[in-house]
Image: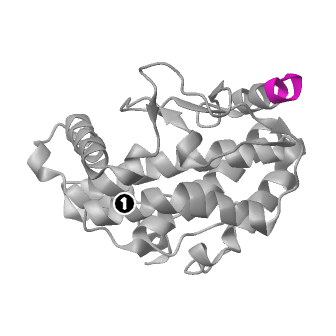
Amino acid sequence: MAGGGRVLDGLAALGPFFAVDSHPPGEAPAPPWRPVSELATQPGVLSQRIAATRATLAARGGRPVGEIESRVAASAAHLGIVARLVAPAVGAAAVGGRVDMRLDGLWWQDVVGGPVPLSVPEPEPGGAVTGEWAERLLRDAVAPVTDATSQVERVSGQVLWGNVASGINAAASQVARARPDLADEAWACARALFASPWLSREQHPPGPAFRRSSCCLFYRLVPDARSWRSAICGDCVLGGHS
């Protein structure tokens, strides 16, 4: 318990995308907590999440919902979810702990805007970062949500797995900024994840200069086609085009 509390405190200190609640393994926290697995197994739940994201994007831009492409909203929703799954795993490993990120043991609250509340089984101290750790995180947590997104909306796998790569790199970057003494551990986590066949499309290694091999499509939220370059993300493949 004490070791698990240390891991939780370490995650909270890294920022809101890392901070999590916890519950005893195998137990279900009380409502409003909901199983994260529903995002991968119940298309209606994921569709509702994407629709809510679409409405939020429209409101932020002062535009009708119909002007926001559904695939852009799907990419935004997916990026928010996978970043939320990846960050605690990377952060915990960096601070010397381990969080079980299998979907059937995770719980969430359907809040739009900012990191969704997430509850994980009580973490454990220790555990080395290995290829097995990386493969398990991608296979058991990230891939099911990614596959479900591509089935609910017509978004290419290259875009969605680029979102995953972006989320991993962002998580390692944030750990390195918040805890420079853990930078080596954070980037080791990112490299282990990038070594997986799931991310074989990525041409650049993780690091401060990382550039993903696809676009998250967020630039399409800009109504004026002439100003789209001002809306591309810092790690976007389009940023390397003149």
Q: Which span of residues is magenta-colored?
A: 1-6
Q: Nearer the viewer, residue 181 or 6?
A: 6
Image coordinates of residue 2 in percent, x first then y, are: 87, 22
Q: Check disc 1 and report the residue beneath it.
A: 148
Query: Which residue appears at 66% of the width and 41% of the height?
Result: 88
Q: For the N terminus, give its image quadrant.
A: top right
Dot 1: element: helix
Task: Give the colouring mode of the picture.
Answer: one colour
Main secondary structure found in the magenta portion: helix
Q: For the C terminus, give its image quadrant.
A: bottom left
As drawn, is 235 to the left or to the right of 56?
A: right
As drawn, is 185 to the left or to the right of 103?
A: right
Residue furthest to the front = 26
Residue 13 against residue 158 in the figure, above or below = above
Image coordinates of residue 99 in percent, x first then y, are: 72, 42
Query: Which residue appears at 25% of the width and 62% of the height?
Result: 153
Q: Nearer the viewer, residue 27 or 55?
A: 27
Image coordinates of residue 204 in percent, x first then y, are: 64, 76
Q: From where the camera sits, is residue 63 visible?
A: yes
Q: Nearer the viewer, residue 128 or 172?
A: 128
Query: Which residue appears at 37% of the width and 48% of the height?
Result: 77
Report which quarter residue 130 is drawn in: bottom right
Report which quarter residue 14 is drawn in: top right
Is disc 1 surrounded by few (<14), some (14 to 19) or many (20+) residues within 10 Å? Answer: some
Counting every numbered tag in the picture gives 1
Q: From where the camera sits, is residue 217 visible?
A: no
Q: Amino acid at mark 1?
A: Ala
User: Does the magenta-highlighted stretch encompass residue 62?
Assistant: no
As drawn, is 31 to the left or to the right of 6?
A: left
Image coordinates of residue 53 in percent, x first then y, are: 29, 42
